[in-house]
Amino acid sequence: MGSMNGKVLVITGAAGGIGEATARLAHAEGARVVLTDRESGGVERIASELGEGAIGLAVDVARREDNERMVSRAVDAFGGVDGVFLNAGIEGEVGPFESRSDGAWEKVFDVNVHGVRHGVMASLAALRSRGGGSIVITSSVAGLRGAAGLTPYVSSKHAVVGMMRCLAAELGPEGIRVNTLNPGPVDNRMMRSIEDQANPGHGEEVKAMYTARVPIGRYVTNEECATMAVYLLSDASGGCTGNTFVVDGGLSAQ
Ligand SMILES: NC(=O)c1ccc[n+]([C@@H]2O[C@H](COP(=O)([O-])OP(=O)(O)OC[C@H]3O[C@@H](n4cnc5c(N)ncnc54)[C@H](O)[C@@H]3O)[C@@H](O)[C@H]2O)c1
């Protein structure tokens, strides 16, 4: 028996990175999954690789109606929703606070904050009709501490920690748990983008500098984050709500 047997999950940002790894692990553990991302190609390919019990769907999390469509698809195809992994996010542009335009702030907040808000709103009725469930939001260590040059991203990742804490208090009595996954630097596309923007043409040097701050001596992996996400989405974490779950190789210990 897998830890996710019988569960239906909806996952955003599932075309790569942490979202894809979580969809693959949850499916292997017995979940039926709706994988969503901005474009249908990647998630449809992964869903067809996974086979029965997996669906790929194009969803822009910044659009309320797309979130509603995502939940409806899960209910129509699999009969309900037990877990929601609100993981889609963008890093935005790296640069000094004063150089960030209104548009740059809005873009990051539309996806990283309002995308999460729409995802929660769209899924509540379905979770209630199952008698409860688990919502996991991907924040970051950038949701717990600052980082020069990343003000919109860091602010957005703090915002969803606040949202999670309020929601956990409001929804706990209904059996709906809400937590954040807070990864440190992950060895994937998003970190390549941040490294290259921080020092164009010298991303490898930036990576070496960041890595030197991580006690385990490396970035964490998509799969290590997925293990935590699946735990939080499973009944094994039934006593956990309203908290931040850090996977950062010890970065924030210092
Ligand atoms: N990579 C890291 O080091 C790191 C560290 C901490 C937190 N995070 C967070 O983890 C989450 C997953 O990122 P990742 O590391 O797997 O990188 P990623 O860029 O591979 O994954 C993010 C996914 O979100 C999707 N996405 C972006 N905007 C979207 C939108 N409007 N609608 C739907 N999907 C959209 C992207 O297409 C992409 O597939 C993000 O929220 C990110 O902020 C990442």
Image (cartoon, helix red, strand yellow):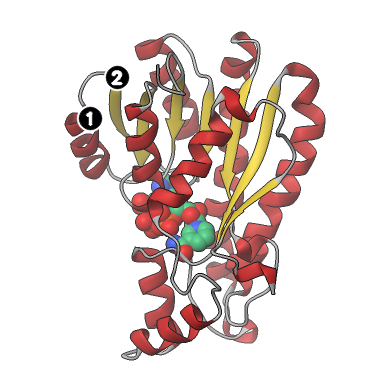
Q: Quadrant of residue 35?
A: top left
**What element does badge 2 sit on?**
loop
Instruction: From the top left corner, tell me how far across and down residue 199 is, in percent.
Output: 41, 90
Give the residue at mark 1: 50
Give the SS element for disc 1.
Answer: helix
Check the image and report above or below for 226 versus 221: above
Q: Eyeballing the image, is 251 above or below 167?
A: below
Image mark count: 2
Residue at (77%, 25%) from the top-left corner? 172
Q: Quadrant of ligand 1?
A: bottom left
Q: Residue at x 58, y 23 (%)?
A: 235
On screen, residue 184 above or below 25: below
Closest to the observer, 125 or 139: 139
- The answer to whether residue 90 of the structure is visible from this angle is no
> Residue 173: x percent and y percent?
80, 20
Q: Which mark is residue 53?
A: 2
Badge 1 local density, few (<14 within 10 Å), some, or many (20+)?
Answer: some
The residue positioned 32% from the left and 29% from the top of the image is: 28
Indicate which disc residue 225 carries.
none
Front residue (pair 107, 87):
87
CB under 8 Å between discs 2 and 1: yes
Q: Quadrant of residue 215?
A: bottom right
Q: Amino acid at mark 2?
A: Gly
Which of 125 and 223 lies nearest the eye of the viewer? 223
Classify residue 139 as left or right of residue 217. right
Q: Amino acid at mark 1?
A: Leu
Q: Residue at x 20, y 42 (%)?
A: 41
